[in-house]
Image (spheres, rainbow, N blue to C red):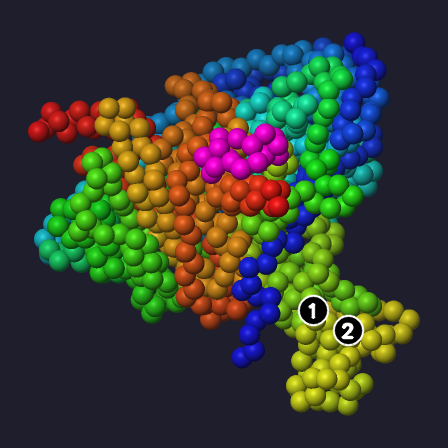
Amino acid sequence: MPKNLVVGQPIPRVDAVEKVTGRAVYGDDLRFSNLLHGKALRSPYAHAKILNINVTKAQKLPGVKAIVTGKDIPVLGGEALKDYPFLALDKARYVGEPVVAVAAVDEDIALEALDLIEVEYEELPALIDPLKAMEPNAPLIHEKLHTYEHIPIVRPVRNSNICHHVQFMKGDMDKAFDESDYVFEDTFTTQMVQHGAIEPHMAVAQVDPGGRITVWVTNDAPHRLRKDLAAALGIPLTKVRVALPPYMGGGFGGKGGLKVETLCIALATKTDDRPVKMVLTREEVFTSSLVRHPSIVQLKTGVKKDGIILAREATVIYDTGAYAEKGPTVCQQGCVAAVGPYKIPHVRVDGYCIYTNKPIAGAYRGYGHPQVAWAHESQMDIIAHKLGIDPVTIRLKNAVEEGDISPTGQQVLHSVGLKECIKKVAQNLDWTKPNKRNKGKGIACGYKNTKTPSGSSAIVKVSQDGSVEVLTSTVEIGQGAKTILSQMVAEELGVPLESITVATPDTDVTPYDASTTSSRSTFHMGNAVRKAAKDAREQLFEIASGLLGMETEDLRSEKGEIYSKDNPGSTLSFAETIKNQYGAGLDIIGKGSYYPLVEDGIGGMWSASSIFWMYGADYAEVEVDPETGQVKILRAIGAHDVGKAINPITCEGQIEGGMVHGIGPTLFEEMMVGERGDVLNPSFADYKMPTTLDIPEVTSLIVEAGHREGPWGAKGIGEMTTVPTAPAIANAIYDAIGVRIKDLPITPDKILSALRKKKLDG
Amino acid sequence: MTRLIQLEVNGEIHEVSVKANETLLDVIRYKLELTGTKKGCDTGQCGSCTILLDGKPVNSCLILAMEARGKEILTVEGLAKNGQLHPLQEAFVQEGAVQCGYCTPGMLLSAKALLDENPSPTEEEVKEAIAGNLCRCTGYVKIVTAILAGAEKMRG
């Protein structure tokens, strides 16, 4: 095999120069003529009937062009479960839910109009605690839950606030617990967290006289959005165009699904072809976009004396807030991994996705996995300490390997770099060396699936001068997709990286892709662009074989030149090849699609088995101040199995970024919700994200357990990098001061009260 | 109330009509169409709107446009000269310090202000200087490396 010239190389990102010069265009940088500005009046109540809305005064305000309420567009949308109104219908279900929207000639007038609108509410009891919301006689947040359309895997429980219940069972639990030498039972919780992308959500919508809708929007899945909008509105897919800005300022899951676009569309139906723009304020991003599911995870684990796990039972509650959003599939995918990446013969998992009157929870880097990893990795250390086994050894003893059945029993695992990840981070550990006072070290691992099946299509277009355009709907959201897709096309087609342009996603132009989520792009879109590049290359070789008088199978291409492997000196450029055949001009169009097969019989989207799994392990070293309860993270090391690093720099960037992202929710990030459902800290001043002053020495390590179906063996990475961070830190804190915190975030007051309790207990 | 004022941005004088309550950020972005300066929170907490005002890094969302009269304003668009990237920009590209890029303009200007005052900063000083610029993608690791590399380049 010849060495790869581009794939696997640490090439600077193709979009970096645009970004450092300020030329990169983001959503709010797009310019429109005749633009109107939209603003939303939001519910002050967590749960309330809407009795009456009076917009008469606002309508009379000069400059106001349109006002809409839920009644104007009484439709329901949603990816997994269709429960989401474009604006509140009949009742509001969380503080911050849009009730009325106004479009005006400028933002000031739109805001003034909001003050003139009168809404009469009848407050209803608000359900804030998911456990109370699960009780049999709890008031219903969605009375019509049983009538909502949903994808096949979603199982709502009738007359309840449970919008999805998932169950996985394997083996004989009672017998296994009887046979265990020790049984451990612990409950762990995680808090509400915000994605914190620095760019706020925005959208511009325009409805033409024929009723065709165009949306320019910060959304991580243009084709999914088109499908969701068309389905909700009952119009053909081609009546909706979703066009993305060239760049997006981060997402981490927060920019998928129906967000601000629904309000813009509702308004644009009434503005006579004028585009309507909305940009969320930071406060609105906090209260009214998306959050990570708070969770409660109960684990019961039976082990033998030697540390081998016999049985593990998990009950997982994901608090999804007012609307399902992606909650049901977060619950589904998180629960598949709830018992950890271990060979466990007897398993039972029950997962519940619960409505409450709080901000909507959905996709968030890790998709339900950080919550379950927090539990299973904290408990692994509890078990290790009780049994007197090294935390590394106990994980290696139980860790899944190539060819094992997945812990919940759906599939045979392939491309499993877990043990190597654990060993790599453990090289930095010496458990025999005693800690310095109040210092400690910890390790944790985990795994993450990808939504399966899901499809990607791509077009690779070779123009007459040999330059190449890649048409893909993968979104450049910061992860480096443009760079690695360019690298793959350059490698497969044999062209210089500089000759490649990656188009901006636009459903009118770029072909179908499920979404830029679930760490799926490198694998799925990578396969699609590789096939498309191969198709284009084969067409070029077909022409060139005639011109060079060679067989196509003997031809090779490099740097845009075609040559025979037997005579590398005689070359024909792509441009000459095309010119010879199509002198008056034509493109060479290569096409590629990828759609994985699913092994298990659960069916529907998305299955419990995953086309690939990512594995990783984190190591953390901390120092705790027992006087103040402050934790300082001294070192963090992450090792992640990416299959094959298409670009080591972007992989390192994901590992470093993911670990630091993970530090925030471990130690201080928490969206505080009051008894009445209002977010108490909706700003970066009161909701602290990590700054440079919070970061330790960070090391990223790449493991490559190649995947037989991945492009060059590559899998994914983005989400996995935050999964083991919190438990690694918690385990280090335990190692430092001997207290175990089971509820995130690990704030100084929790540490101090745990230390006090430890002292009292002697 | 609207007034016609002059603003000096990246060495160029712009005559622009502004409202009394209009922020410098909004005027730079929406009236001068220099969209490289980003808006992340509009309340001075994220740092993505950082510009240099007479060489000092400031959150342009916290300053009224009127207050910037008679001062030198530098935005990200003014960093590269004659098509040649500033050494800090080069270092950000080379070191992989850019991911989504939304915090990048603010980071670059905070870093430039530091290096203009202190050409040989320590890692701790770099971290201090950009502590007001939030980044959710990179974990800051490669940003800090890039600023140190940029400093080295500038020292020659």
Regarding mark 1 in the picture, which secondary structure is present there?
A: loop
Q: Residue at x 60, y 14 (%)?
A: A119
Cβ–Cβ under 8 Å for marks 2 and 1: yes
User: Is A723 contained in the magenta span?
Assistant: no
Q: Which residue position is annotated with label 1?
A: A495
Q: Earlier in the sequence, mark 2 or mark 1?
A: 1
User: Is B115 contained in the magenta span?
Assistant: yes
Please state which of residues A158 and A470 is positioned toward the viewer in this rendering: A470
Mark 1 residue type = Val
Q: Which residue position is annotated with label 2?
A: A574
Q: Residue at x 24, y 24 (%)?
A: A627
Residue interval drawn in magenta: B112-129
Please state which of residues A25 and A343 is positioned toward the viewer in this rendering: A25
Mark 2 residue type = Phe
The reply to whether residue A335 is in sight is: no
> Whole-percent x and y of residue A736?
22, 38
| Above or below, A753 relative to B66 | below
Q: Residue at x 85, y 78 (%)?
A: A581
Could you tell me which chain the residue with mark 2 belongs to? A
- Determine which quarter of the picture holds residue A139: top left
